[in-house]
Amino acid sequence: ENIVRKDQEERPDLIVLTPTCTSSILQEDLANFVQRASLDAKGDVLLADVTHYLVNELQAADRTPQQIVQFYTEKARKQGTLPQGKTEKPSVNIIGLTTLGFHNNHDARELRTLMAQLGITVNLVMPEGARVDQIQEMGRAWFNLVPYREEGLMTAQYLEAELGMPYGDMT
């Protein structure tokens, strides 16, 4: 009921429920919470598979966006709304930029400037600044760029496997 209440108060497009040590110790059935909330919530509700006993914070930060991209890619595919084809001009998704890093804002500006100088349009920056309605458009970019080893690689690997999108990483 807390998920549905938050959905009604905030009207988010997506609510991501993540396990905690307490929910794991209490053996709460979070999948059931998500399933029940999905029936009444207007937005999407997703359970992140990031059990703290199995993954650390950096792994969870990499895995959660991949699960979100997978969720919306599969949803668009089922609805027949997954865009086909690439953008007319070369374009890139920059995956893994967040506001959590010390130099990330500066790096984002520099990467946008570099891409513009190379004649490459930035299709989407994820997770920072991305909206869920834009995620299904990720496949239209010509390639993905992952500037940090901590976050984004799993998403790029998923998009390569599912949509045949090449990626470059800085690791």
Image: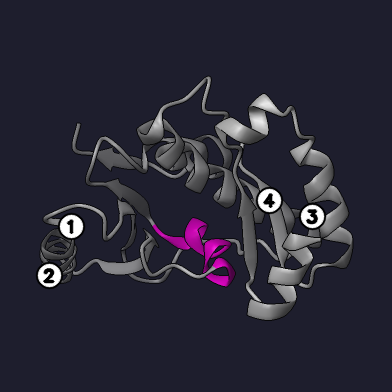
Task: Tell me: residue 110, above or below residue 97.
Answer: below
Q: In which quarter of the image is residue 22?
A: top right
Q: Mark 1 points at which residue?
A: 104
Q: Earlier in the sequence, mark 1 or mark 2?
A: 1
Q: What residue type is labelled 3?
A: Lys
Task: Tell me: residue 28, above or below residue 89.
Answer: above
- Depth-wise, is mark 3 or mark 1 nearer the camera? 1
> Which one is in front, 93 or 95?
95
Q: Residue at x 13, y 54 (%)?
A: 102
Q: In which quarter of the image is residue 75?
A: bottom right
Task: Tell me: residue 119, above or below residue 155.
Answer: below
Give yes or no for residue 10 being in the magenta stretch: no
Contact (CB < 8 A) between labels 2 and 3? no
- Distance from the alpha carbon under mark 2 to that under mark 3: 36 Å
Label 4 CA crowd tier, 10 Å (few <14, some 14–19, many 20+): many
Q: Mark 2 points at which residue?
A: 113
Q: Which amino acid does label 1 sit on?
A: Asn
- Distance from the alpha carbon under mark 1 to that under mark 2: 14 Å
- Depth-wise, is mark 2 or mark 4 nearer the camera? 4
Q: Mark 3 points at which residue?
A: 78
Q: Mark 4 points at which residue?
A: 46
User: Magenta span covers which residues?
Assistant: 132-141
Q: Which of marks 3 and 1 is nearer the N terminus?
A: 3
Q: Position of residue 83 (x, y in %)?
A: 61, 64
* Scheme of colours in the image: one colour
Mark 4 lies on a secondary structure that is strand
Q: Position of residue 27 (x, y in %)?
A: 74, 27
